[in-house]
Image: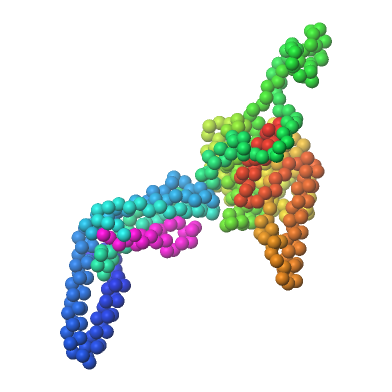
Amino acid sequence: MKQFYNTLFLNNRFFYTLGAIALMFVVGFFVPIFFDVSKTLLFILVVLLFVDIFILYKTKKGITAERIVPERLSNGDENKITLLLKNAYNFTAHLSVLEEIPYQFQKRNFVFNQQLKNTSKKTIYYNLRPMERGVYLFGNINIYTSSPLQLATKKYVLGEFKEIKCYPSFLKLREFDFKAFNNQSITYGSKKIRKIGNSLEFEQIKEYVSGDDIRTLNWRATAKRNQLMVNQFVEEKSQPVYAIIDKGRAMQMHFNNLSLLDYAINATLAISNVILKKQDKAGMLTFSTKLEDWVVAEKRNSQMRLISEALHNIKTNFSESDFSTLYAVVKRKITQRSLLIIYTNFETMDGLHRQLPYLRALSKNHLLLIVFFKNTELKGLTEVKTINTLSVYDSIIAEKFIYEKKKIVKELNKYGIQTLLTDPKNLTGDTINKYLELKYRGLF
């Protein structure tokens, strides 16, 4: 009886009709014929209500539902969720499907209104775009079912609670794979880039033959053998590449509801996949007041899983990042020359100068790529038409900060440090393109 009471609801149609009959009763005090008509209509309404309740509860499982969710959610992407509905009634059911989606989306009235014909099925699709990593809890599927009379409603509580982990963006990995191996993905203009430097590993000494590079002549071996000898090299295909994520307070700015930290995490996952496909070794680490989430650069089959798990668990302590600790640990643990991609953010020259000695020290032993972010909201301020003194001040200050970013790029380049200043939304693609450019030029 308690279950019956908790699942039965009376519809607005019933109350509207009852209100109209009540009004006729009032009129019946002045016009007696309306009083008799009102009693008849009230009797019919009560009978129809009981009939409606009977046909709703006659079938025990009149409506069934199943929710299909992916094994994990992709942060910042549209994730497809599917609801499968089935009507076992022998009449067309009017449904209001109330989904209990995770609280992180802050939607308390996520409803689908549907009509489902007798003994038929229906599929509902919708997308959810999570904006933070973590665990997402899906609740019940509440379905309010009415018959064609629509006087009463029966509530079905279906589905089950399910926890889904949200990982850094992985849905676009295939898209970036395509770009990485597509010759059209990087446009350097019409001028062919000259490959400078070398990434060659010594293999053996052999006799000189026509066509060998005379710059590889080994004069000591030539003197001993009394004939020209050259050093033979093989190209090093497996170069270590480390993505280093600053998780200090500078990375907590939000653009399009996603923090710079999450943009960097998503880019790290995508570029790690490209690095491994290019036969290099992918690794990562994070730092703030100390170094954490260390994944050694390797080329094994399980590397993407290790990196994904490490990225999923990254949390920030909102502290000022300590670049001196980063330098000390990297110098001790990363002994082979590597490409270090550091995701951080500098807003002023003063902020850069505090960390510049450590960045210069890192660049002596490794190829250093500093990735930081344009403030796209400032650009909007410079494009707004100035109509008063305050807007003029805002525009000038915004231009000053934009110019400061350009000065930071020049300052880093002056010391031979590679830089990438990019919009947050273009971070992943720009970082992959920069990595491919550095690899093509043979800088590491």
Residue 419 or 359: which is nearer the viewer? 419
Q: Residue furthest front?
A: 190
Q: Quadrant of residue 141?
A: bottom left
Residue 248 or 266: which is nearer the viewer? 266
Query: Which residue is pictured at 62% across the width and 35% down the height?
Result: 183
Q: Looking at the figure, which quarter contains the N terminus?
A: bottom left
Image coordinates for residue 81, horizontal then vertical, percent: 42, 51
Q: Is residue 31 left or right of residue 405?
A: left
Query: Which residue is pictured at 59% across the width and 34% down the height?
Result: 181
Res 37 seen here = yes
Image coordinates for residue 149, horizontal then vertical, percent: 24, 67
Is 291 part of what is drawn in magenta?
A: no
Q: Residue furthest top?
A: 226
Is 111 part of what is drawn in magenta?
A: yes
Q: Quadrant of residue 339?
A: top right
Image coordinates for residue 351, horizontal then vertical, percent: 75, 53
Bounds of the magenta span? 92-114
Q: Looking at the figure, which quarter contains the C terminus?
A: top right
Residue 432 or 362: which is nearer the viewer? 432
Res 244 seen here = no
Q: Quadrant of residue 385?
A: bottom right
What's the colour scheme? rainbow
How many numbered marks does the figure carry? 0
Q: Is residue 318 left or right of residue 419?
A: left
Query: Which residue is pictured at 20% across the width and 65% down the height?
Result: 54
Query: Which residue is pictured at 59% across the width and 50% down the height?
Result: 262
Q: Is residue 433 left or right of residue 76?
A: right
Image coordinates for residue 173, horizontal then vertical, percent: 54, 41
